[in-house]
Image (cartoon, rainbow, N blue to C red):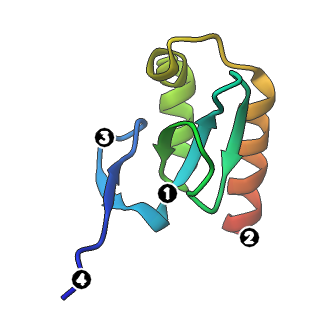
Amino acid sequence: MKKVPERMCIGCHTARPKRELIRIVRSPEGEFSIDLTGKSPGRGAYLCREAACLEAAYKGHKLEKTFKMKMDQKIYEELREIMERESR
């Protein structure tokens, strides 16, 4: 049996298979992006595909704490759009 890589959601602190999560990446140049493939280079943080986890991360400034940098609101808006599309 092959081991499935797991990552922890920064919103709910639940370990889940990596493919079930959304990865937010800070590139070596310091730019933030959403990595749906999970293969972009840079420092990553993971979120469940649930609105409650996104809200917990937003209210607790968990992405800022993880990356030790100020986050652009554009990333949160993109994450909300992705989650809304997937919930339909």
Q: Secondary structure beneath disc 4? A: loop
Query: Mark 1: few, some, or many residues within 10 Å (few <14, many ≥20)?
Result: many
Residue at image point 63% right, 50% down: 40
Q: Secondary structure at mark 1?
A: loop
Q: Are marks 3 and 4 in contact (CB under 8 Å)?
A: no
| Amino acid type indicated by mark 3 | His
**Mark 2–mark 4 distance (CA, rounded to whole Å):** 32 Å
The relative height of residue 39 versus residue 67 in the rendered view (above or below) is below
Whichever of callouts 1 and 3 sits on the residue coming sooner in the sequence is: 3
Q: Please state which amino acid type lies under the numbered disc 4.
A: Lys
Q: Which callout, 1 or 4, points at the residue further toward the start of the chain? A: 4
Q: Give the quarter of the image for residue 73.
A: top right
Q: Give the distance between the C-alpha atoms of the residues marked 2 and 3, in whole angstroms.
A: 25 Å
Residue matched to label 3: 13
Amino acid type, mark 1: Leu
Q: Which residue is mark 1?
A: 21
Indicate whether 19 appears above or below 21: below
Does residue 71 sit above or below 1 in this rendering?
A: above
Judging by the rendered image, the residue that carries numbered circle 4 is 2
Question: Which is nearer the N-term, disc 3 or disc 4?
Answer: 4
Q: Nearer the viewer, residue 42 or 81?
A: 42
Q: Position of residue 60 (x, y in %)?
A: 47, 18
What residue lies at 50% left-to-right and 29% top-to-bottom? 57
Q: Which mark is residue 88?
A: 2
Which residue, as the protein is rendered here, is positioned at the far bottom? 1
Residue 77 lies left or right of residue 46; in this view the side is right
Which amino acid type is shown beneath numbered disc 2? Arg
Q: Using residue 40 as the reference point, say whether residue 7 is left or right of it.
A: left
